[in-house]
Image: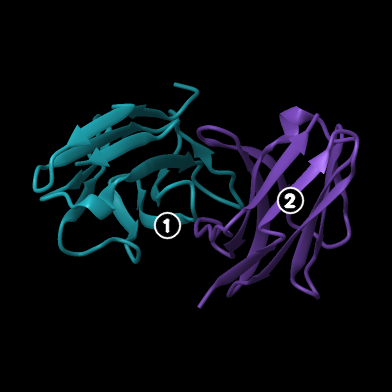
Amino acid sequence: EDKVVQSPLSLVVHEGDTVTLNCSYEVTNFRSLLWYKQEKKAPTFLFMLTSSGIEKKSGRLSSILDKKELFSILNITATQTGDSAVYLCAPTDNYGQNFVFGPGTRLSVLP
Amino acid sequence: GEEVAQTPKHLVRGEGQKAKLYCAPIKGHSYVFWYQQVLKNEFKFLISFQNENVFDETGMPKERFSAKCLPNSPCSLEIQATKLEDSAVYFCASSPHTGANVLTFGAGSRLTVL
């Protein structure tokens, strides 16, 4: 059965701190891994990772995938209160249409 | 349209009543997904469609839940005889037709069963 584990489940930091969120997965015929940010409503897309070792960056956020060890990390540097959200990772299978969501990491950034 | 449109935003039902939620995927997207999120917990996959055909229904409770995606109509998720535990936010998402895809989510429909 496909499985996704995210850690930590909850994290409280202060503005300016750097955080690393972890996602490990077991997915049959893995193809790619997506990261989403969920604030009050719908999750919004952050990154899609398909290849190992290639870092994707968007402003203060970056993410990388390790297909050998079956995990991905999401880094946020110089956190701001607006980064407070639940961060979800979702690996997909080879067909690209089976998304398995992890439980999420709830990040709270205090001023 | 360029967004996944879900209606209604909030629906309140008494136990035993029927609830029906709607989703219009992004124009040109072939896949539609329904997820249930209870109390901001995990996303539970319910069902996915490829156009009007069921693609994967492994998450769908067999007894009271049904879903359709008909041509030229919004997709729908219907719950017969709602129970308290059906209270959740139901998210619809859509994705394009091939390849490693990105799911785009709607804003969700909050169902409250009293």
Question: Compared with residue B67, is residue B25 higher up or lower down, i.e. above or below?
Answer: above
Classify mark 1: helix, strand or loop.
strand
The image quadrant that residue B75 belongs to is: top left
Residue under pointer 2: A11
Q: Quadrant of the N terminus of chain B?
A: top left
The image quadrant that residue B64 belongs to is: bottom left
Residue A23 - label: none
Badge 1 density bin: few <14, some 14–19, many ≥20, Cα 10 Å: some
Q: Find residue B103 and report its horizontal and vertical position in percent.
A: 54, 43
Direction from residue B46 to residue B100 in the image, left or right: right
Between B40 and A35, the residue placed more toward the observer is B40
Direction from residue B95 to residue B8 in the image, left or right: left
Q: Amino acid at mark 1?
A: Lys
Provide the chain ID for the residue under circle 1: B
Between A15 and B62, the residue placed more toward the observer is A15
Residue under pointer 1: B44
Direction top: furthest residue: B1
Q: Find residue A9 and report its horizontal and vertical position in percent.
A: 66, 58
Classify mark 2: helix, strand or loop.
strand
Direction from residue B100 to residue B29 in the image, left or right: left
Tell me which residue sits at (50%, 23%) in the image: B2
Instruction: Inspect this view and state whether residue B7 appears.
Output: no
Tell me which residue sits at (9%, 43%) in the image: B17
Q: Which shade of the palette goes to chain A?
A: purple
Tell me which residue sits at (60%, 73%) in the image: A29
Q: Find residue A75 and report its horizontal and vertical position in percent.
A: 84, 48
